[in-house]
Image (tube, rainbow, N blue to C red):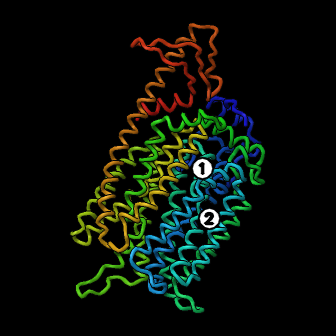
Amino acid sequence: MSTESPVSDGQVTEKTQSSEPEYYRKPTLIRKILSWTDEKTGWYPPEMSLEERDLIRKIDFFVLGYCCLAFFTKYLDVSALNNAYVSGMKEDLDLGGNQLNYITAVYQVGYCTFQIPSNILITKLPSQYYLPSAEIVWGLFTLGTAFVKSYNQLLALRFFVGFGATACYVGCLHIVNCWYKKVELGRRNAIYYSAMPLGTMVASYLQAALLEHLDGANGLQGWQWLFIICAIITIPIAAFGFFFFPDVPEKTTSRWFSERERKLAFDRLQNDGFEASKGLSWNLVRRVFGTWQFWTFIFMGNLFWLAPYAASNNPFILWLEALTDENGNRTYSDVLVNNLSSVTSAVSIVSALLTAVYSDWRRNRWEMMLLAGILMLVGNILLLVWDLPRGALWAGFMLLGLSNGPGNLVIVWAAETFAHDVEARAITLASINATNCMLYLVIPLGAWQVKDSPRFYAGYVTSVCMSAVQVFLIPVAVFFQRRDAKRLAQQFVACEAIAMDNQDLEYVIGEKTDAVVTTGVEINSKDGEFVEPVNVHDSEIKQADETKKW
């Protein structure tokens, strides 16, 4: 892959406009409608060329479209277990105690076991074949779950569902973040993330409908039909991936993208500061583990995703199932329990989309994350207190659903921070997911034991502590980011001054957007200390300038 820096923003616009195919200069009715839609929705920057807009429409359909569908089916199949459990599976398989915890844990074991091999394979194998193949694997094992006869069989099937689903999240997330510029990432990641609560919602609605219409049909219970329908949805989506999903921009040979479009897709990312691969070396260890970003995002991401556990997992649906009236009768039927359990997921989708639009507009991620963290803390405190009116507990769960929405901004923030280093970005995102997987295996077994439902005192104590810590971590991350931006700006000014005084120094700026200022001497700073020779990228200077505005 060439690492030559593309031309500057202004030059790219002028060059692109002058070299665009003729049909872009002759607006048709369809193109006028598209332009009007673009202007009203603000989906594309007004200065973006028509050719680039058409390219992004293709990327949205082929890349984001398939990734969202794959992530949707993953959570459709995963969430089906909780809905099936409260809809007859528990009684049919004679489940009790903490067995639901163990079934979920076995899924996580399968998911974690294949994490590292899967992350290696996705860099070696064409992702347009690897990811859909993995989706077919978990789809087939989801289908098999419908026909289990015992607890042990269920354990085995859920292990292999986790095994097959390993590649989905990190693989799709990595590829989505490889196709879009920074200003485009917030909303696209929000759409991708929304596929998760959408899968949970649809599983709830499907189970409710199947209990009403197919329970007992052909000798199968409603919960069994749920796994069958989930598999029927999953496998055709995998087939879509085989035919339409491209690889990353520098590797794609997709028939759906012309050579010109493939080049434009790659060049526009280089122009935005996303650099080509630096390759694997021991220096990568320092570039990843020696940074505050890696450790901060590991802790922040996991706390942000684990703290609202009650809203997106079994505590909420088990609470709904356990509610009774003054006579001791269940408040909600199985159908209503499944339908109502989707409410927190619906709130998360709305929250994810709104906060993404706001964060793109503000060009920062921390404001919405901090607000979500405060709501998360309040919601968990309400549920920890517990002895409150039922409306207050509903409010607690809804606050957790709201705060769950901006969780995707952690990934966007991390991807932007490591925009200049492909390997460091991939390792950081994979590490966040791997540690989250391990924590989802361990913490529910200790803090969210089903035998303690619906109170889950230990779980809410844990979540309150996590919420408080992550609210503290967000300002810490902002402090370090602003500190680095200030240092980078100072080094840039020092390099510029020396370059003007030394004719022998290599100083190239203005002709290329991702220009490099290189100094071969040490710079004497104001406090008498020496600054190490630096390699400053113009994209980082732009980021530093934006950070100062924050």
Q: Where's residue 138, x and y in %?
A: 62, 68
Q: Where's residue 494, x and y in %?
A: 50, 15
Q: Residue at x 37, y 69 (%)?
A: 449
Residue type marked 2 = Gly
Quadrant of the rendering where the C terminus is positioned:
top left
Is residue 217 left or right of 530 when viewed as pictured? right
Instruction: Report, in whole angstroms, how far the alpha carbon at label 1 lies from the one at label 2.
Output: 18 Å
Q: Nearer the viewer, mark 1 or mark 2?
A: 2
Foreground of the two, 217 or 402:
217
Secondary structure of the residue carrying numbered label 1: helix
Quadrant of the rendering where the N terminus is positioned:
top right
Q: Where's residue 368, x and y in %?
A: 39, 48
Quarter location, residue 295: top left
Which mark identifies residue 174?
1
**Is residue 42 visible from the viewing direction of this image?**
no
Foreground of the two, 243 or 470:
470
Is residue 331 left or right of 488 when viewed as pictured? left
Q: Residue at x 45, y 29 (%)?
A: 485
Foreground of the two, 225 or 340:
225
Quarter location, residue 392: bottom left
Mark 1 or 2, nearer chain start: 2
Q: Identify the residue under disc 2.
A: 164
Secondary structure of the residue carrying numbered label 2: helix
Q: Please rate how many residues cluster around mark 1, counting C-alpha atoms within 10 Å: few if below 14, some from 14 to 19, many from 20.
A: some
**Is residue 523 visible from the viewing direction of this image?**
yes
Residue type marked 1 = His
Q: Is residue 286 above or below residue 399?
A: above
Q: Residue at x 41, y 73 (%)?
A: 341
Is residue 321 left or right of 233 when viewed as pictured? left
